[in-house]
Amino acid sequence: MSKQPYLVLRSDDIEPFTHPEETSYHSQHILGHESAGTHDLLLNRGVVDPHHGLGGTNHPDNDEIYYALSGTSLLDLGGHPDTGEGSRTYRIDPGMTVFVPAGVFHRLRNVSAEPFALLTIWPQPAVRGANGIHDARLDTWGTGFKLRQGCELVKDDQSMKVIEPGSSWDPEVQAGATSA
């Protein structure tokens, strides 16, 4: 038996955070030490609004993985680590994966009419100073993980799940169930 409870939730149960200086990007901190007790992983769901982009950055000590969920975006990679000058541009479609090594400039630019949604994975802890959006979320909320109003985290000794009591939504099915 694991020392750590497992966690089942819907990404939409997590309150999106929008940085005051990056108002076209909405970030949902799904997994990390605040939600699942993981010490070396951060999973985030991000959405870039249509016809908007992010300023671009690099994370000197953190690798990052992108997995595109929906929509299409351009991604500038490489070049100068602070400005991206000399970077290469790639089209990112659903199902594509990108590995961004620590210190590499990266910038998402959604040039389409649809939102671009992706998972971002940090295979190491997100310490303060490593990511401006994560830092702003901590400064604003006091935590990286916040459930939407009406959702509730239920725990026992082996599991955690997010339920929505007002709608009777619960991901757990009864023992012996043969269909969802």
Image (cartoon, grey):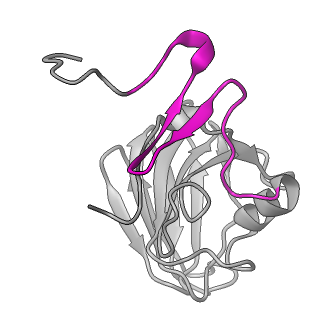
Above or below: residue 52 compared with residue 59: above
Q: Position of residue 114 (x, y in %)?
A: 54, 31
Residue drawn at point x = 68 percent, y = 38 percent? 15
Above or below: residue 51 compared with residue 4: above
Q: Position of residue 67 (x, y in %)?
A: 39, 55
Q: Position of residue 53 (x, y in %)?
A: 66, 52
Residue 164 figure quarter: top right
Q: Position of residue 154 (x, y in %)?
A: 54, 37
| Helix, strand or loop for the magenta stretch, by majority | loop
Residue drawn at point x = 62 percent, y = 13 percent? 166
| The C terminus lies in quadrant | top left
Looking at this view, is 151 or 14 the one in front? Answer: 151
Range shown magenta:
142-171
Looking at this view, is 36 or 13 the one in front? Answer: 36
Is residue 145 located in the magenta-colored stretch of the structure? yes
On the picture, is 138 further left or further right than 169?
Answer: right
On the picture, is 17 further left or further right than 12?
Answer: right
| The N terminus lies in quadrant | bottom left
Above or below: residue 123 compared with residue 26: below
Residue drawn at point x = 76 percent, y = 46 percent? 18
Looking at this view, is 15 or 66 the one in front? Answer: 15
Residue 82 figure quarter: bottom right
Residue 141 visible:
yes
Is residue 33 located in the magenta-colored stretch of the structure? no
Residue drawn at point x = 35 percent, y = 43 percent? 94
